[in-house]
Image (spheres, rainbow, N blue to C red):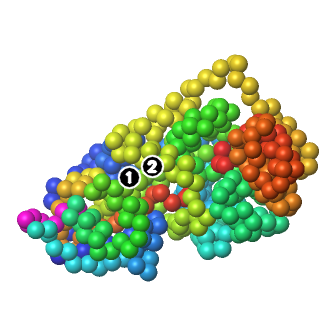
């Protein structure tokens, strides 16, 4: 399943070469027939995050203060961690924790 | 963004305000689910209402927007210039930026402010620590290391904003402090027992007795909504952590607030309400406001905090004016007993005055 992931608000600094946009191919986890946000987060943590994962993840979810949008919709309206992803979805992560 | 091409998810909810378009976010303040267009309207209207209800501005005033290039001040500059036109406030708006002299951080964020100057058509003034104090933060960190450097930066910035505002001949400074910031500061002031700041940190306008009042139009605006607004509107802002170690204590308070918000988003507004309703007991001694003998800046001591800190830097005793623990007879960690004693004495005298530190 092809997804576009975008990192902003300073989160891009945790990734290799501070790249903001990543086109990735993610499969549902074993035993699940659909990919969920929960699965995606652990995939991102093990495959994309190069440093300070605690700035991104806390207790299996994103760290409080990190906003998530699925196809430009607040993930709180899509089911949060249980939101199911579809091919070609765009998922955006933005940190609100950096200076103003 | 490729949202137009992306599939719309079946069963997506409609905006509770217009009932027509697909909801795009959940408002932390009200838990309403609203679409992007309705969000722009309520976000801007609430800020307008805050400005009107609190009489923040008078027609004809010159107003400086403290602009760091970060999300809050960028959104503030954008929204304020829109509202000024839409509701005919009659304000002359300016961007005012401070160059602390932090290579790889402030120089980059100032580039953002320079783009904002063109994008929003607002004149920009930059004042630098180098010009005002003859020290950059890079120099200061070289002299004192990575401990206490945030104290210098906070004290100097506060004064630099006032000096820049005086150069621009403005009547008022507005800053982008949002509801999350204010809730965080209420907690910090409780944790530090700083009663003087606790009582004023929730004021929407401060410094009315001084030369240039400051106000916070985002006092009731959630950080989440500011970032969502910037994202949807594709505003150009800069987001990198300062390279000179974040303020750890503030970091804890911030994290705590964010944890609370996740469980109960109203907590942020409730903490602000608590802060507003504290009554300081009449037996609490509050610092009296005067002016600095050397530079004339507001101060509750003979010398203002910035002058004490500068003195320390220029005399090679950078710990002057740092910390609050000095007690008569307590060991000073300065170099040499004479110097230590002197530092201690000055330290004590500068401590009782709780002005001009950090952000509020």
Task: Residue B294: say if magenta.
Answer: no
Which corner quadrant holds the C terminus of chain B? top right
Q: Where does label 1 land, which residue?
A: A64
Which residue occupies the foreground of this view, B49 or B243?
B243
Determine the main secondary structure of the stretch shown in magenta: loop
Mark 2 crowdedness (10 Å alpha carbons): few <14, some 14-19, many ≥20: some
Task: Residue A35: say if magenta.
Answer: yes
Q: Where does label 2 land, which residue?
A: B255
Left or right, B124 with reference to B239 = right
Which residue occupies the foreground of this view, B54 or A54?
A54
Q: Is mark 2 on a helix, strand or loop?
A: helix
Left or right, B12 with reference to B168 = left
Q: Position of residue B84 (x, y in %)?
A: 61, 52
Q: Where is residue B290 in the image (x, y as percent from the top left)?
A: 85, 37
Label 1 marks a residue whose chain is: A
The residue shown at (29%, 49%) is B15
Which corner quadrant holds the N terminus of chain B? bottom left
Marks 1/2 in contact by CB < 8 Å: the verdict is yes
The residue shown at (88%, 41%) is B302
User: Magenta part of the protein: which range?
Assistant: A31-37
Seen as rendered, the residue at the extreme top is B282
């Amino acid at each position: 399943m092809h997804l576009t992931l975008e990192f902003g608000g300073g989160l891009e600094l945790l990734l290799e070469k501070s790249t903001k946009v990543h086109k990735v191919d993610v499969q549902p986890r074993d035993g699940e027939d659909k990919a969920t946000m929960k699965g995606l987060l652990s995939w991102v943590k093990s495959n994309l995050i190069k440093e300070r994962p605690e700035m991104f993840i806390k207790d299996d979810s994103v760290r409080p203060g990190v906003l998530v949008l699925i196809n430009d919709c607040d993930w709180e309206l899509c089911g949060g961690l249980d939101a199911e992803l579809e091919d070609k979805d765009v998922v955006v992560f933005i940190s609100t924790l950096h200076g103003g | 963004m490729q949202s137009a091409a992306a599939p719309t998810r079946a069963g997506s909810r409609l905006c509770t305000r217009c009932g027509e378009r697909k909801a795009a976010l959940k408002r932390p303040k009200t838990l309403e689910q609203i679409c992007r267009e309705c969000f722009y309207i309520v976000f801007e209207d609430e800020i307008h209402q805050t400005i009107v209800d609190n009489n923040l501005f008078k027609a004809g005033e010159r107003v400086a927007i403290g602009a760091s290039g970060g999300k809050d001040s960028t959104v503030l500059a954008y929204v304020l210039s829109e509202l000024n036109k839409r509701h005919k406030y009659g304000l002359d708006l300016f961007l005012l930026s401070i160059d602390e002299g932090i290579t790889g951080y402030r120089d980059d964020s100032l580039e953002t402010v320079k783009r904002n100057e063109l994008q929003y058509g607002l004149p920009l003034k930059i004042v630098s620590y180098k010009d005002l104090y003859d020290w950059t933060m890079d120099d200061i960190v070289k002299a004192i290391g990575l401990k206490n450097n945030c104290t210098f930066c906070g004290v100097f910035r506060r004064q630099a904003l006032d000096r820049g505002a005086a150069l621009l001949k403005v009547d008022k400074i507005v800053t982008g402090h949002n509801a999350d910031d204010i809730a965080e500061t209420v907690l910090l002031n409780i944790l530090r027992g700083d009663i003087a700041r606790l009582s004023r940190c929730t004021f929407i306008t401060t410094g009315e007795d001084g030369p240039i009042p400051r106000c916070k139009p985002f006092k009731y605006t959630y950080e989440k909504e500011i970032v969502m607004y910037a994202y949807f509107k594709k505003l150009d802002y800069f987001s990198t952590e300062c390279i000179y170690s974040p303020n750890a204590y503030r970091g804890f308070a911030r994290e705590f607030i964010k944890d609370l918000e996740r469980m109960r988003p109203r907590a942020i507004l409730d903490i602000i309400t608590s802060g507003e309703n504290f009554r300081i007991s009449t037996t609490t001694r509050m610092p009296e406001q005067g002016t600095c003998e050397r530079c004339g800046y507001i101060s509750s001591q003979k010398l203002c905090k910035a002058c004490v800190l500068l003195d320390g830097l220029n005399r090679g005793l950078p710990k002057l004016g740092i910390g609050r623990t000095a007690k008569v007879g307590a060991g000073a960690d300065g170099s040499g007993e004479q110097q230590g004693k002197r530092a201690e004495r000055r330290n004590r005298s500068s401590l009782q005055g709780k002005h001009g530190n950090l952000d509020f």
